Image (cartoon, rainbow, N blue to C red):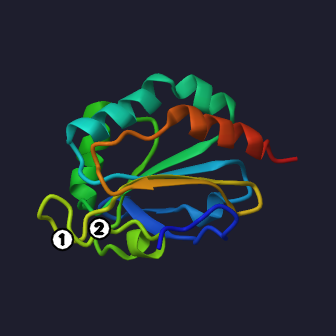
Amino acid sequence: MTLAVGQDAPSFTLPEAPGRMVDVGACYGTGPVVVLFYPFAFSGVCTEEFCRFRDDWSTWAEMGVRVFGVSVDSAFASAKFRELEDLPFPLLSDFNKDVAKTWGVLHDDAFGQKGVAMRAAFVVGLDGRIAYAWSHEDGSNQVDFEAIGIAVAACGSPS
């Protein structure tokens, strides 16, 4: 079951590139955190989603948000996708599928592929709890950028 608003956000550490780990849980409490699960690097909807975050990056940065993309792609694919799209935030590899499973967003079967992350968006507030949660079985559905922004703004900034 997908994690819901009000639940504690599980901490996790994943590679953003081979040998380069990112501790997302260490960011909880330092400002709002957005965790974006996505099915496949280089796919059209994923590229559109991340490029929109990139193109609006000054707005997100002003809100003090930390953004992390997470997929079951390898760290090599995630790093290349980030590089090619010039993304200002890490794309993390959940190759072993542990984080997607913990957050309740691992597909049993998506497009004939077993164990792919759903398209999902979570906002983690300053208290380490989920302030916004959305996921969809159909990876062609886009996240609601406005709803994410509203949730981030409602989190406030650290004192």
Q: How many marks?
A: 2
Q: Position of residue 81 (x, y in %)?
A: 26, 42
Residues marked 2 and 1 touching at CB (< 8 Å): yes
Q: Position of residue 24 (x, y in %)?
A: 55, 61
Q: Is residue 10 above or below residue 61?
A: below
Q: Is residue 120 left or right of residue 33?
A: left
* Residue ID at (28%, 59%): 75
Q: Is residue 78 left or right of residue 11?
A: left
* Residue ID at (79%, 42%): 156
**Element type at mark 2:** loop
The label number, if any, that marks residue 67 in the structure image: none
* Residue ID at (44%, 23%): 55
Hey, which residue is sitting farthest right in the picture? 159
Residue 51 falls in which quadrant of the image? Answer: top left
The amino acid beneath tag 2 is His
Residue tagged 1: 114
* Residue ID at (48%, 50%): 68
Q: Is residue 140 left or right of residue 104?
A: left
Between 16 and 20, the residue placed more toward the observer is 16
Q: Position of residue 128 (x, y in %)?
A: 70, 63
Residue tagged 2: 107
- Classify mark 2: residues with Cα within 10 Å, few (<14), some (14-19) or many (20+): many
Q: Is residue 112 above or below residue 62?
A: below
The amino acid beneath tag 1 is Lys
Hey, which residue is sitting farthest left in the picture? 112
Between 66 and 9, the residue placed more toward the observer is 9
Q: Is residue 66 above or below residue 92?
A: above
Among numbered discs 2 and 1, the one appearing first in the sequence: 2
Between 125 and 131, the residue placed more toward the observer is 131
**Element type at mark 1:** loop
